[in-house]
Amino acid sequence: MKNPPNPALNLAPFSRWTLRDKAAQRRLRSTLDHTMSKPESVIIRPYEPSDVQCLFEAGSESVSTVGTWLEWCTSDFSLESAQAWVDLQTEAFKAGHEYQFVICSESGRFLGGCGLNSLDRPNARANLGYWVRSSSTQRGVATSAARQLAQWAFQNTDLVRLEIVVAQGNAPSLRVAQKVGAIREGILRQRLCIHGTHHDAIMFSIVKSDQDEA
């Protein structure tokens, strides 16, 4: 069975005889590269009651990826679990205990989540985290969301320091921390326990003065 045509790729101009021409080959490669690597535009917003089903679907499809590093994302994640999370985070946001956001596309598709937790008010510090559903990875989603979240934090709260703590083996999250310009501060030995296994973690930070100087 032939694969269905990809409507995003218009290969009509590249007939068999033109592919012999190097210029045509370069144009084809450019078309393919642009389609496959174009970053996805995203926005972040607080959770809403209508997000329950979307959160459940995103979590369910991402057990083999997100679930490796986040304990809530398992095969047991249910619609009831998603409902409880949305209810909890809606109230926590209002109370200022945590600030959790949905990451979504400009068209409104649920792509993942990001947030500020473990708030240390006396020291104006919080943890910054992020996750992206399996079908939307490698498109710059987490990087864009993390940047927006840091900007929101410094503009709307008294926080002056955001920490990103990433398990040493979590390569995708490490790349995001680096891309947003977070400063690597060192290795925290056995800092994270995930699914019963202890992991060394790398500490990154973003401080408000860095943003002011940018």
Image: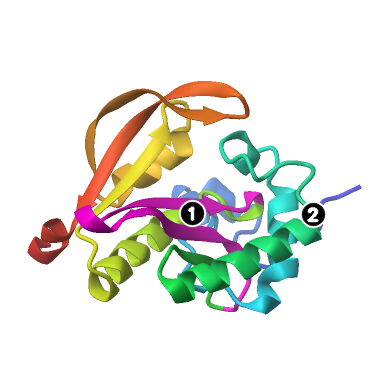
Mark 2 vs 1, N-terminal side:
1
Image position, residue 3 (x, y; %): 82, 51
Q: Residues within 10 Å of mark 1 (few under 14, many from 20)?
A: few
Measuring 55% from the left and 46% from the top, which residue is drawn there?
A: 20
Measuring 64% from the left and 69% from the top, which residue is drawn there?
A: 87
Question: Please, which residue is most extreme toward the left here?
Answer: 213
> Residue 78 occupies which quadrant of the picture?
bottom right
User: Which residues lie in the magenta part?
Assistant: 107-134
Say which element carries label 1. Answer: helix
Say which element carries label 2. Answer: loop
Q: Amino acid at mark 1?
A: Ser
Separation of residues labelled 2 and 1 (CA atoms): 33 Å
Q: Nearer the viewer, residue 3 or 21?
A: 3
Image position, residue 48 (x, y; %): 61, 77
> Residue 213 occupies which quadrant of the picture?
bottom left
Q: Is residue 6 visible?
A: no
Q: Nearer the viewer, residue 206 or 83?
A: 83
Quarter of the image with the C terminus in it: bottom left
Q: Nearer the viewer, residue 185 or 124?
A: 124
Residue that mark 1 sits on:
37
Image position, residue 140 (x, y; %): 45, 55
Image position, residue 41 (x, y; %): 46, 69
Q: Which mark is residue 170?
A: none
Q: Nearer the viewer, residue 58 or 86?
A: 86
Residue that mark 2 sits on:
78
Residue 150 horizontal side relative to residue 28, left or right = left
Magenta stretch secondary structure, dominant: strand
Measuring 64% from the left and 49% from the top, which residue is drawn there?
A: 134
